[in-house]
Amino acid sequence: MDKKIISTAALFGMIAIILGAFGAHKLKEVLTLEQLNTFETGVKYQMYHALLLLFVGMNATLSLKTKNAIYFLTLFGVVFFSGSIYALATNSLTAFDFRMIGFITPIGGLLLIMAWSVLLVSYLKKKA
């Protein structure tokens, strides 16, 4: 499980860097400042959660059940939250209207909050 979590963390981190560079160098030519800021928000949250997964994958004190819960909440949270933000920020560049899937963004955000909540509760339950 740790190998899968750390591999996903590395993949999320790598993609965040690629998308951040793409946004800074190529998308600035075709998007408004507001759209670029929105895109950057997706990149930041993806990177934050890559670091969360890295922490979880390397943490020996968390149970397998806790790691699984955090992994899947974070995985789907990043895909829904950051993925929908990328689509919405670049909506003007495509023929498909991504505003139809805008409702996915807060669902992704809720999944990310739940991942952090699982981590918090796990540590609050631990005996000193």
Image: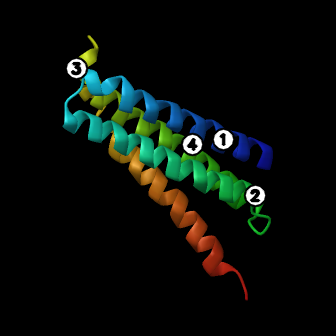
- The residues bearing labels 2 and 4 have C-alpha atoms spaced at a distance of 17 Å
* Residue at the (68%, 60%) spot, across then down: 66
Q: Of 84 and 64, which appears nearest the observer? A: 84
Number of disc labels: 4
Q: Report x, y in % for residue 7.
A: 72, 40
Residue identifier under label 4: 75
- Evaluate if marks 4 and 1 touch, with contact meaning CB atoms under 8 Å apart: no
In primary-sequence order, the first of circles 1 and 2 is: 1
Residue identifier under label 2: 58
Judge depth for marks 4 and 1 and give the one in front: 1
Vertical comparison of 121 with 112: above or below: below
In primary-sequence order, the first of circles 4 and 3 is: 4
Is residue 72 left or right of 76 when viewed as pictured?
Answer: right
Query: Which of the 4 image quadrants contains residue 128?
Result: bottom right
Badge 4 element = helix
In primary-sequence order, the first of circles 4 and 1 is: 1
Mark sitting on residue 92: 3
Disc 1 residue type (three-letter): Ala
- The residues bearing labels 3 and 1 have C-alpha atoms spaced at a distance of 30 Å
- Evaluate if marks 1 and 2 touch, with contact meaning CB atoms under 8 Å apart: no
Badge 2 element = helix
* Residue at the (24%, 26%) spot, across then down: 31
Q: Answer few, some or many: residues within 10 Å of disc 2's Cα (few below 14, many 20 plus, some between 14 and 19).
A: few
Q: Answer few, some or many: residues within 10 Å of disc 1's Cα (few below 14, many 20 plus, some between 14 and 19).
A: some
* Residue at the (70%, 46%) spot, across then down: 5
Disc 4 residue type (three-letter): Leu
Can residue 73 be seen by looking at this rendering? no
Q: How is the image coloured?
A: rainbow
